[in-house]
Amino acid sequence: MIQRMQTVYLLFAVASAVLLFFYPIAEFGDGISSMHYVKLYIFKLIDYVPGNEPLFPTAFLYPLVVLNSLVVIISVVSVFMFKKLMVQLKLIRFGLFLNIALIAAIFFFYTNQISKAVLDDPDYKFGIYLPIITLLFIILAMRGVQKDIKLIRSADRLR
């Protein structure tokens, strides 16, 4: 049901989570004085200095890809659960938990590990804001579903 506001919020959450695949999260190094100039995307780590060995194996970023993909899938599935509000609320809460885990992994593990390997602090790009925007839209959708549940319960009391 597209006329429900929480459906719109969930679709915006899906859009911002999908955009995370296209925008860099952070840059490390300056490319002039450092040995590495690295851009962190959610699914790849690009070193722009030619001839450098990869800093991490390709499976290093798989947990980020899995977490973000699960947030997208759960948000899309919860859009179609509008007839079962309690199930929809549980799915949205699980998506909220996964998104918080994604943000924590990016900030506390991945940028820390890469900055130790490159020996430079991260320069955050637009992609770092997208999981936070997704979190905001998921919280708004959760509040909308909670309002619907409250409205249905109040209507049931009147019967």
Image: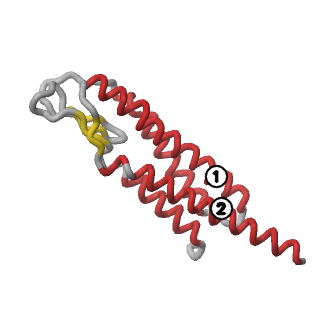
Picture quarter containing residue 43? Answer: top left
> What residue did someone put label 2 on?
81
The numbered mark, 2 or 1, whose residue comes first in the sequence reads 2
Q: Position of residue 46 (x, y in %)?
A: 24, 35
Query: Looking at the figure, which quarter contains the C terminus?
Result: bottom right
Q: Are marks 2 and 1 in contact (CB under 8 Å)?
A: yes
Give the residue type that dot 2 points to. Answer: Met
Residue 14 vs residue 118: left or right? right
- Give SS at disc 1: helix
Residue at the spot 55% in from the left edge and 43% down from the top edge: 98
Give left or right: position of 148 versus 104.
Answer: right
Residue in the foreground of this view, choosing between 101 and 20: 101
Quarter of the image that includes the N terminus = bottom right
Badge 1 amino acid: Leu
| Mark 2 element type | loop
What residue sits 48% from the left and 58% below the top? Answer: 13
Along the line of sight, the residue nearer the viewer: 27 or 4: 27
Residue at 46% x, 45% y: name it.
68
Q: Is residue 30 above or below residue 88?
A: above
Q: Position of residue 30 (x, y in %)?
A: 16, 35
In this view, the residue farthest toward the front is 121
Q: Which mark is residue 91?
A: 1
Q: Nearer the viewer, residue 78 or 12?
A: 12
Label 2 CA crowd tier, 10 Å (few <14, some 14–19, many 20+)? some
